[in-house]
Amino acid sequence: MKPDIYGDFLKDYQAGNHDLEVLLNNNYTLSEDFPVDAFFREDEDLNDIEVFALNLCEGEILDIGAGAGVHSLILQRNNFDVTALEISAGACEVMKQRGLKKIINANVMDYEEKKYDTLLMMMNGIGFCGYVDELKNFLIHAKNLLKPNGQIVFDSSDVSYLYEDEQAETDSYYGEIDYQYEYKGESGEWFSWLYADEGLMADLARECGYQLQIMFRDDDNAYLGKLTLL
C-alpha cells in the first residue's frame, strides 16, 4: 500500500500539532513550506474566489478532492446537501472527526454511483488530473456525475509567469507541474498537478461538450470557472 503522507500530516494537524513542517518539492524551483493550515480555514478566511464559488453552489453538491473538508463543512453548516469525495483515507478520517456527515473515500475517476447538481473543485481541484489529456478524460467522465442542468464549479490559474525568465525545454504544457511531499523524514511519490489557463479550459470544454463561463478573476492570475453541459 502506498504511504498516505498527505493524510498523515492532515491527521497530525487535526490532533493539535499545528507547528508541523511539510516540504513541497517541485520541478521548477526550490522546495517550499506547505501551508497545512490552509486546509483548516473558516468562513472568514476564504478568499474572494472561494466565497464566489460557494455562492454558486446549489442542489446536491459533490466536493471533489475535499481534503480536510474546509469547503464541505462551510456548506454543511449552511444547510447545503454536500458530500465530500476524497482519495486519501487519512483526509477522510479527519473530515469525519471534524463532523462532516457525508464522506466518500474514492478516486473520482472510479466513482459514478450518483448524479449531482454541482461538482465543486476548489483549491485548483482539477489539478489532480495532472496532464491535459487526463483533464479531458475527467471532463468526459464527469458527465456521468452531473444531472442534466448540473454544473462544475472550479478554480485554476495561469502559471506561465513561473517561466518568464527562462525558455521552457519541454514539449509538455507548462501547467503540468511535478510535486512531492516530504514529512517527518519521509518522501512521498512524485505526482503531476495541472494548472489550466482559461484558453486551455475553453478549448477542452468545447471539445468535451461543455460551455465555460469565467465567473471571477483575481489579481494573481487565478480565475473561477463554471462548466455546464451543452
Image (cartoon, rainbow, N blue to C red):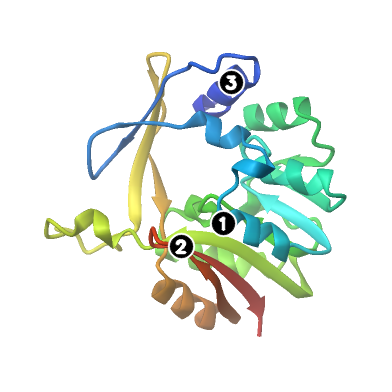
Residue at x-position 37% and y-position 34%: 180
The percent position of residue 112, horizontal first and vertical second, equals 74, 58
Query: Which residue does the image show at 68% across and 43% down from the upper left?
Result: 43
Local secondary structure at mark 2: loop
Q: Which is nearer the N-term, disc 1 or disc 2?
A: 1
What is the quadrant of the C terminus in the image?
A: bottom right
For the residues labelled 1 and 2, say whether their Cβ atoms are less than 8 Å apart: yes
Q: Tell us which disc is closer to us: 1 or 3.
A: 1
The numbered mark, 2 or 3, whose residue comes first in the sequence reads 3
- Circle 2 crowding by C-alpha within 10 Å: few under 14, some 14–19, many from 20: few
| Residue tagged 3 | 13
* Observer able to see residue 106: no
- Residue 127 x/y as whole percent: 48, 53
Badge 3 marks a residue whose secondary structure is: helix
Crowd band around label 1 with a 10 angstrom C-alpha radius: few (<14), some (14–19), many (20+) = few
Answer left or right for 124 relative to 46.
left
* Location of residue 45 by image quarter: top right
Q: Residues under labels 1 and 3: Cα distance? A: 25 Å
Where does label 2 land, which residue?
218
Disc 1 designates what residue? 48
Please provide percent x and percent y for residue 149: 77, 77
Query: Mark 1 falls on what kind of element?
Result: helix
Name which of mark 1 and mark 3 comes first in the sequence. Answer: 3
Q: Residue type at mark 1: give it.
A: Asp
